Image (spheres, rainbow, N blue to C red):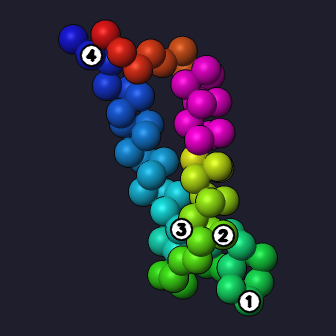
């Protein structure tokens, strides 16, 4: 049976860190904007880097394995 913890963590982080949903870093007018429902290339890159770092740290913290 595959460990579903990595999948669950990934889905939760993806939803929470989607650019423009809860916040956007960097924003259009300010460094951080909340719930503006817009994105830019810079915010997509920043959110992807933050997602990768947080996902990796959570996997190390909880000793989650991605495979069988």
Left or right: residue 68 compared with residue 31? left
Tell me if label 4 and label 3 are in contact, CB under 8 Å.
no
Tell me if label 3 and label 1 are in contact, CB under 8 Å.
no
Along the line of sight, the residue nearer the viewer: 33 or 46? 46
Label 3 – label 1 distance at C-alpha: 15 Å
Say if 59 sits above or below 43 in the image: above
Label 2 – label 4 distance at C-alpha: 35 Å
Say if 16 sits above or below 1 in the image: below
Secondary structure at badge 1 equals loop
Residue assigned mark 4: 2
Q: Which mark is residue 18?
A: none
Label 4 – label 1 distance at C-alpha: 44 Å
Spot occupied by residue 1 in the image (x, y as percentages of width and height):
21, 11
* Quarter in which the C terminus is drawn: top left
Left or right: residue 11 compared with residue 17? left
Q: Nearer the viewer, mark 2 or mark 4?
A: 2
Residue assigned mark 3: 19
Secondary structure at badge 2 equals helix
Q: Nearer the viewer, mark 3 or mark 2?
A: 2
Categorize mark 2 by other alpha carbons within 10 Å: few (<14), some (14-19), many (20+).
some
Left or right: residue 32 compared with residue 7? right
Disc with the residue nearer the chain's start (4 vs 3): 4
Tell me if label 1 and label 2 are in contact, CB under 8 Å.
no
Spot occupied by residue 3 in the image (x, y as percentages of width and height):
32, 18
Residue assigned mark 2: 42
Q: Quadrant of residue 32?
A: bottom right
Disc with the residue nearer the chain's start (2 vs 4): 4
Q: Which mark is residue 29?
A: 1
Left or right: residue 14 compared with residue 4? right
Spot occupied by residue 34 in the image (x, y as percentages of width and height):
61, 78
- Residue at the image position 59 percent from the left and 41 percent from the top: 52
């Amino acid at each position: 049976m595959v460990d579903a913890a990595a999948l669950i963590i990934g889905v939760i982080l993806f939803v929470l860190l989607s650019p423009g949903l809860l916040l956007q870093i960097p924003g259009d007018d300010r460094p951080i904007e909340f719930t503006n429902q817009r994105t830019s290339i810079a915010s997509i890159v920043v959110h992807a880097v933050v997602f990768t770092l947080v996902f990796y740290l959570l996997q190390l913290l909880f000793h989650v394995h991605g495979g069988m």
